Image: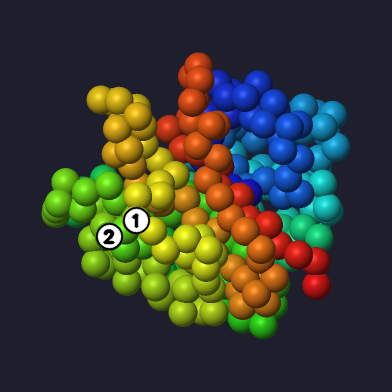
Amino acid sequence: MTWNVNSLKARLPRVEAWIEEVQPDVVCIQETKLAQEKFPTEAFASLGYESAHFGQGQWNGVAIVSKVGLENVMLNFAPTVEQDHEARIISATCGGVRVSSVYVPNGRSLDHDHYQYKLSWMKRLREHLDATCAPSDDVIVAGDFNIAPDDRDVWDVTQFADATHVSEPERDVLRHVCDFGMEDTFRRFHNDAGLFSWWDYRGGSFYKGHGMRIDLLLATTTVAARSTWTTVDRNARKGESPSDHAPVLLKVDAP
């Protein structure tokens, strides 16, 4: 599963309770907003999970938490790819599957330097895949992509005219990553519009259904073919002090 927790320090009790109840095999976490030494390794260990973290203090931060093994951890992109100056990607092998937890830059606005950084980052993600694995391998790239793949993934696309998350260059670089041999597994099971993973805190967006689907689980063909269901846990977006994202889960049968 993947979950942008929007500060693990603020959300740790909720995350612990959710993991204890659901018992996922692998958890990809984004926006930990923790320094490396502040990551709650012991808290996850007490639940039966190994963990790896790539932290950056009060910003960004990605982690993988696993109870099916955690090997060959890689922080940042592959060494042959231009390294990023922010903590936005971590990879590890979990139960025979190469897993990456990613937090793609937001982009801010189409005329902002951060938008160009976002496009460059996604191109480097494709280079990272080319450098570290093959399309025939078992690979999952999960995380907050800050890109709605198509218009079904936005509550009202007209509200995002000339804005990030839905622009064609962003969708093009996402398709370029998928062209490696990755599938947006959510669409294997759900074709409907209006199924979201993020809702703004403001204006009652969650209860109005004003959201976007920007948290994705991309998988190579061998993994996607063994997947049996996927869902968004909307209940985790409710209650006191939730993240603005909900967890997205994918069930994959063993080979």
Left/right placement of residue 95 relative to residue 148 reads right
For the point 52% across and 68% down, the residue is 188
Who's the residue at 75% across and 61% down the image?
93
Looking at the rendered image, the disc whose residue lies closer to the viewer, 2 or 1, is 1
Pick the residue in front: 171 or 82.
171
Q: CA distance from mark 2 to mark 1?
A: 8 Å
At horizontal 31% and vertical 63% (from top left) the residue drawn is: 150
The disc labelled 2 sits on which kind of residue? Asp
Label 2 belongs to which residue? 151
Measured as percent of width and height from the top left, residue 141 is found at 58, 61
Compared to 246, does 8 lie above or below? above
Q: Nearer the viewer, residue 153 or 105?
A: 153
Residue 123, placed above or below residue 113: below
Q: Is residue 228 visible?
A: yes
Q: Are marks 2 and 1 in contact (CB under 8 Å)?
A: yes
Taking 22 as reference, is 243 above or below it? above
At label 1, counting other C-alpha atoms closer than 10 Å, the crowd grade (few under 14, some 14-19, many 20 or more) is few
Q: Position of residue 67 (x, y in %)?
A: 82, 46
The residue tagged 1 is 193
| Residue at position x 31%, y 58% in the image | 152
- Say which label, 2 or 1, has the lower sequence index: 2
Mark 2 falls on what kind of element?
helix
How many numbered marks have been drawn onto this rendered protein structure?
Answer: 2
Which amino acid, mark 1?
Ala
Residue 83 in view (yes/no)? no
Question: Splitting the image into 4 quarters, where does residue 77 fall?
Answer: bottom right
Disc 2: CA contacts within 10 A as few (<14), some (14-19) or many (>=20):
some
